[in-house]
Amino acid sequence: MQIIFSDIDGTLLNQEHQVTPATARAIKACVNKGLYFVPISARMPEAIRPIIDEIGIPSPIIAYNGALIQAQDGTVVDSKIMAMTEVLSVCHTIEKLGQDLAWNIYSYKAWYSSQQAHNLVHNEEVVVGLKSQIADLDQLASLKEAHKVLVMCPPERTEQVLQALKEDYPDLSIAKSLPHLIEVMATGIDKGQAVKALADYYYVPISETMAFGDNYNDLEMLETVGQGILMGNAPQALQERIGKVTLDHNHDGIAQVLEKEILK
């Protein structure tokens, strides 16, 4: 095994949004043996890097579910962006759909949020440990490109907003990631393509890769790598499909596998 990929929320992090000491030790021991450990998430790069720094390892990262891939030295391996005309159009649509919605625009290290629905934006800031930059769409018109639009909705409105966006923007990738979150990105982005791209960059056969995940947006990744492993907190139907399941994210599921299969 040469590369270990891991989803972050619900996988690498426990319910307190922390990497447990046992998991951090196991990951660090694998890196010390010469393996790459690669976090892969819908998060922006600046919300991933502190987690890696806390573990105390150098690491490539895959952000925005694969729209941005950075090598260990920071080199951009791949970047799939949306044109700002598309981004601004989506955000204008969100504003027309109601004051209880909020848009967020992510471009490389930057996170811009609307001045609506402050509580939803604040909750996301708490989860990722970063502050967004409040902006209006006129201010952002000079941006050249963006990797993702994140739409925040009251959960009871998410399906309605999701369907409206899919009807208006059939050429974009639009999906619900949590009961109150909708992610909008360029089409053709998924974690499976991203792990293959990074493995190719490091000349590592895909058979020599392993990945941990906990939900349906991890499925392509888990079915692409040499060994896909689900956390015990994953949906039952997904566990049955993937087959290999470890302990949940609160009980060192990653550490259990690494200690048994790599550090033995």
Image: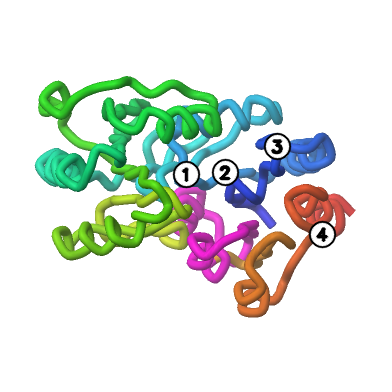
Closer to the observer: label 4 or label 2?
A: 2
Q: Are marks 1 and 3 in contact (CB under 8 Å)?
A: no
Mark 1 or mark 4, earlier in chain: 1
Residues at marks 4 and 2, CA–CA distance in whole angstroms: 19 Å
Q: Are marks 1 and 4 in contact (CB under 8 Å)?
A: no
Q: Which is nearer the eye, 244 or 173?
A: 173
Q: Which is nearer the eye, 231 or 100?
A: 100
Q: Which residue is mark 2?
A: 39
Q: Which mark is residue 16?
A: 3
Where does the image place residue 36, in percent across and percent down from the top left?
Answer: 63, 44
Residue occupying image coordinates x 74% and y 41% = 27
Mark 4 or mark 2, earlier in chain: 2
Callout 4: SS: helix
Where does the image place residue 224, in percent across and percent down from the top left?
Answer: 52, 68
Is 81 left or right of 89, judged from the image as shown? right
Q: Give the quadrant of the N terminus.
A: bottom right
